[in-house]
Image (cartoon, rainbow, N blue to C red):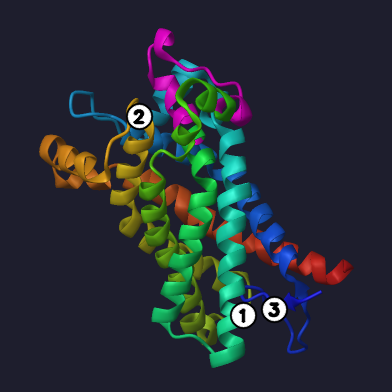
Amino acid sequence: MPGKEIHFADKDPIVKVMPTWVNFVLGGMSGMMAISIVQPADLVKTRMQLRGPGEKRMTFLGMTRDIVNKEGVRGLYTGLTAALFRQATYGTGRLGCFNGLMDIYKGSYGTPSFAMKLVMAMVSGGFGAFIGTPAEVALIRMTADGRLPPERRRNYTNVFNALSRIAREEGVTTLWRGAVATCTRALVVNGAQLGSYAQVREMLLSTFGNGITLHFVSSMIAGFVTSVASLPVDIIKTRVQYAAKGTSQVSVLMSVVKNEGVLALWKGLLPTYLKIGPMTVLIFVFLEQLNALYYKYF
């Protein structure tokens, strides 16, 4: 079966080959393991992004306290099934596609430039995002439900209940509401995250050597770059998908800037980084370990 090298793992000079489909599976698994840890930060970020100009401003800690007081500690994990399903679709697609494109390019042209890494990361992100849009819609709805009055809550029990009810009550196409916004965000996120991680890792390799320190530092830098670059499109995506009726990215952008100011586009920067920074670290650390286990036993 055709295979490939894993680019983020530290292998010895002997080339070992992994079947392409395994790379997709391990990519999805690493994303699911990571989101299981950082889901509370993602939930707090979503709640902060949905607060309008008429609502009381809340800090990251204040929002966290409010959620725990009203919904209990378990409330911080609302929507976890949707988050896991999102990683199983979006995470699998983007990481598998990125590594595949890297292999194809290296086999034909050698080591890609930073610009080419960005292009491949963005293409991979768009591919994964389209596949993962239904899970994204379910995730936004489930994590936002607790901020509504009891009579207006949708009360989805899990991601599959959410997907079936959305399709039945609002039409199948609603599952892809905000697909353009989701893909736009994914282009930015993956260009920043995968592209900057690969580039920073390459630049710092001689300083730190191969190992966990290199992965951690590279991931945290990539996480910060990703947070700043992606937050405006993330806020727009969140509001488009949460809206009761379809709306465009442009109208949401103009509304936010007009009613809340330009800086509102970076609302929730701290929880975003608290999610993306560790998420980036965990994804690549878990991916390294899963790769190592595969090579050890298979």
- Give percent across and percent down for residue 82: 57, 36
State which tag comes first along the sequence, 1 or 3. Answer: 3
Element at badge 1? Answer: helix
- Spatial CA distance of label 1 from label 2 is 46 Å
* Magenta region includes residue 143: yes
- Give percent across and percent down for residue 289: 72, 64
Q: Please state which of the two labelled residues, at mark 1 or mark 3, is closer to the viewer.
A: 1
Element at badge 2? Answer: helix
Q: Please state which of the two labelled residues, at mark 3 or mark 2, is closer to the viewer.
A: 3
Residue 158 appears in the picture as rendered: yes
- Spatial CA distance of label 3 from label 2 is 45 Å
Element at badge 3? Answer: loop
The dominant secondary structure in magenta is helix
Kindly identify the amino acid type of the residue bearing the numbered disc 2: Gly
* Magenta region includes residue 214: no
- Give percent across and percent down for residue 119: 42, 73
Disc 1 target residue: 103
